[in-house]
């Protein structure tokens, strides 16, 4: 028989992309108001793995990944996804999204993204939100799965998440770095 226990808190991350670089910065600022200070931010990336969003959001698309200093309970990802959906809606123009914000979390074992879309490998959480197991940590690095979005499977992106996992691991040990994003 397994004995239920509470999981460790996890590290909240978000992918933010838009054709408007300034909007990415505004969205990041609003996310900080909701979730606390950002403790890491990726360099600016060109989001070119798919042109799926082009008709709605324009082209080219720019992306930043961010993480937040404050750790969260894993089940808070549901409320987080609902908050980021609300923020996306705030910036809609003529019914079209201008920014896409995809929250997720890092634990020692995995990267989980939150989504409102059901699929075979996604587990329903609550309030219309599913957990998408995106990367698993194995043999010293995050590894993609057969359903992992191609952009999340790129070595550069996996390197970012490995770095964030190291930061998270230090936080769990009480060894926090005072590094502010640029």
Image (cartoon, grey):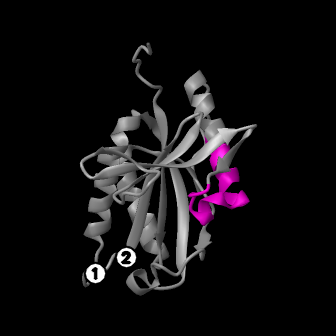
Question: Where is residue 59 shown, x and y percent of the image?
Answer: 50, 85
Q: Is residue 130 left or right of residue 182?
A: left
As measured in the structure, the alpha-carbon distance from the residue carrying label 2 to the one carrying label 1 is: 7 Å
Question: Where is residue 67 shown, x and y percent of the image?
Answer: 51, 48
Residue under numbered circle 1: 93
- Quadrant of the image for the C terminus? bottom right
Look at the image and give the residue range highlighted in magenta: 146-164
Q: Which mark is residue 121?
A: none
Residue under numbered circle 2: 98
Q: Are dots 2 and 1 in contact, CB under 8 Å?
A: yes
Eyeballing the image, is 1 above or below 29? above
Q: Main secondary structure of the magenta part?
A: helix
Residue visible at 75% across and 37% down?
A: 139
Q: Is residue 149 magenta?
A: yes
Q: Residues within 10 Å of mark 2 (few under 14, many from 20)?
A: many
- The answer, for residue 174, to whether it is visible in the render is no
User: Residue 50 is drawn in which quadrant?
Assistant: bottom right
């Amino acid at each position: 028989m397994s004995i239920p226990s509470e999981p460790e808190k996890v590290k909240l991350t978000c992918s933010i992309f838009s054709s408007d670089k300034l909007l990415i910065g505004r969205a990041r600022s609003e996310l900080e108001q909701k979730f606390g200070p950002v403790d890491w931010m990726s360099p600016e990336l060109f989001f070119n793995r798919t042109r799926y969003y082009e008709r709605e959001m324009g082209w080219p698309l720019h992306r930043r990944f961010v993480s937040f200093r404050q750790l969260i309970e894993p089940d808070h990802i549901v409320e987080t996804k609902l908050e980021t959906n609300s923020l996306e809606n705030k910036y809609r123009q003529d019914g079209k999204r201008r920014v896409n914000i995809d929250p997720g979390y890092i634990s020692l074992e995995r990267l989980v993204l939150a989504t409102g879309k059901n699929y075979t490998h996604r587990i329903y959480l609550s309030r219309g939100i599913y957990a998408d197991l995106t990367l698993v940590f194995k043999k010293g690095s995050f590894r993609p799965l057969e359903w992992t979005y191609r952009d999340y499977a790129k070595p550069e992106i996996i390197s970012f998440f490995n770095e964030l996992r190291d930061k998270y691991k230090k936080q769990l040990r009480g060894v926090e770095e005072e590094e502010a994003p640029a």
